[in-house]
């Protein structure tokens, strides 16, 4: 019985560690993408482009609330503050949450130029988007 409990604890720890490492990796990718964007003069895409992206995200099953992403993270808060300073706004943005597949903040990502997004996008994420949301703006050339 004791061995079963030890094995179960070990298994739970491994599952927790795996999801934590995944969360950490996605957070670092998001942070690097945003840093590069702001480091590149912070030039966002045109408002009509970010609005068109937002409209697609607002109708997507991968736009989900994620307390971890949206409440913790210094980079997230700083970039949100930068977005406010730059007066980047789209209609319906309060309903933009976390992109479930890579845990990035959609309220920020819709403003980021493609070259920065593509630089860090993992192939497995791209494949998952193609499968789950073929109309996604991230697949547009
Ligand atoms: S798959 Fe595309 S449309 Fe859907 S939430 Fe992600 S970025 Fe938005």
Image (spheres, grey):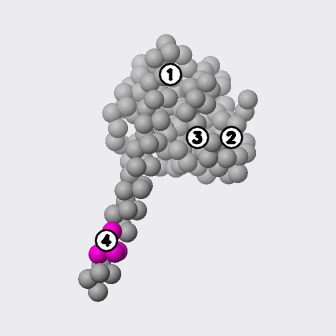
Q: Report the mark closest to the observer, 3 or 2.
A: 3
**Callout 3 environment at 10 Å: few (<14), some (14 to 19), or many (20+)?**
few
Q: Which residue is mark 1?
A: 37
Residue at the image position 61 percent from the left and 31 percent from the top: 118
Could you say where residue 3 lies in the image, as x and y percent from the top left? Answer: 29, 81
* SS assignment at label 2: loop
Magenta stretch containing residue 7, yes or no? yes
* SS assignment at label 1: helix
Residue at the image position 46 percent from the left and 19 percent from the top: 38
Q: Camera-side residue: 12 or 62? A: 12
Q: Which residue is mark 4?
A: 9
Res. 122 mark: 3
**Numbered range of the magenta stretch:** 6-10
Circles 2 and 4 in contact, beta carbons < 8 Å: no
Q: Which residue is mark 2?
A: 136
Q: Is residue 108 visible?
A: yes
């Amino acid at each position: 019985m004791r061995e079963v409990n030890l094995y179960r604890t070990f298994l739970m720890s491994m599952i927790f560690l795996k999801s934590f490492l995944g969360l950490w990796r996605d957070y670092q990718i998001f942070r690097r993408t945003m840093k590069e964007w702001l480091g590149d003069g912070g030039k966002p895409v045109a408002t009509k482009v970010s609005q068109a992206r937002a409209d697609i995200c607002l109708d997507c099953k991968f736009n989900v609330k994620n307390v971890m992403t949206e409440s913790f993270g210094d980079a997230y808060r700083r970039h949100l503050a930068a977005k406010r300073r730059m007066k980047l706004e789209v209609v319906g943005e309060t309903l933009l949450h976390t992109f479930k597949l890579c845990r990035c903040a959609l309220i920020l990502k819709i403003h980021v130029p493609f070259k920065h997004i593509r630089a860090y996008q993992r192939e497995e994420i791209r494949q998952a988007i193609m499968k789950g949301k073929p109309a996604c703006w991230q697949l547009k050339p």
